[in-house]
Amino acid sequence: MLKNEDHQMQMYDDLLERLVPDSHIYRRLSLLIDFPTLLTTFESCYSKMGAGSEPLTRGFKSLMT
């Protein structure tokens, strides 16, 4: 089961904004990647049953930093 973004993710995004330097490649990639469109592509891979997973956006952003 795919979890949606929550308030905690917003705090994570705010923290990244403060910690990641303006020159970091994460900044450029985040402008290029349309996360909502990307997530709809992967939604079909997740079951509607069972325990929820971590939000995909969190995973992608963690890999990029």
Image (cartoon, helix red, strand yellow):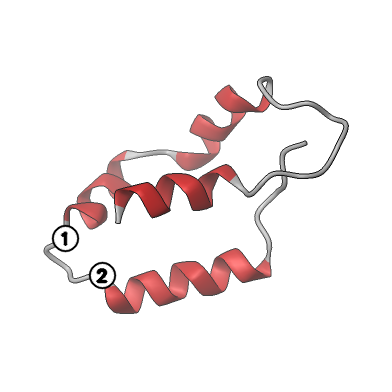
Cα separation, mark 2 vs mark 1, equals 7 Å
Return the residue at label 1: 24
Whole-percent x, y for residue 42 in the image: 59, 26
* Horizontal relation, residue 16 to residue 13: left or right: left
Q: Is residue 9 left or right of residue 6?
A: left
Residue that mark 2 sits on: 20
Q: Residue at x 46, y 67 (%)?
A: 13
Percent from the top left, x then y, of residue 19?
29, 76
Q: Position of residue 30 (x, y in %)?
A: 32, 49
Q: Residue furthest front?
A: 51
Task: Determine which of the numbered discs, if any, sits on residue 61 in the image.
Answer: none
Residue 47 rendering spot, x and y as whole percentages: 78, 26
Label 1 neighbourhood size at 10 Å, few (<14), some (14-19), many (20+)? few
Asked whether, in this view, residue 3 is left or right of residue 58, the answer is: right
Which image quarter is the N terminus in?
Answer: top right
Secondary structure at numbered mark 1: loop
Q: Residue at x 71, y 27 (%)?
A: 46
**Amino acid type of the residue tagged 1 in the rendering:** His
Mark 2 Cα-neighbour bin, 10 Å: few <14, some 14–19, many ≥20? few
Name which quarter of the figure residue 9 lies in: bottom right
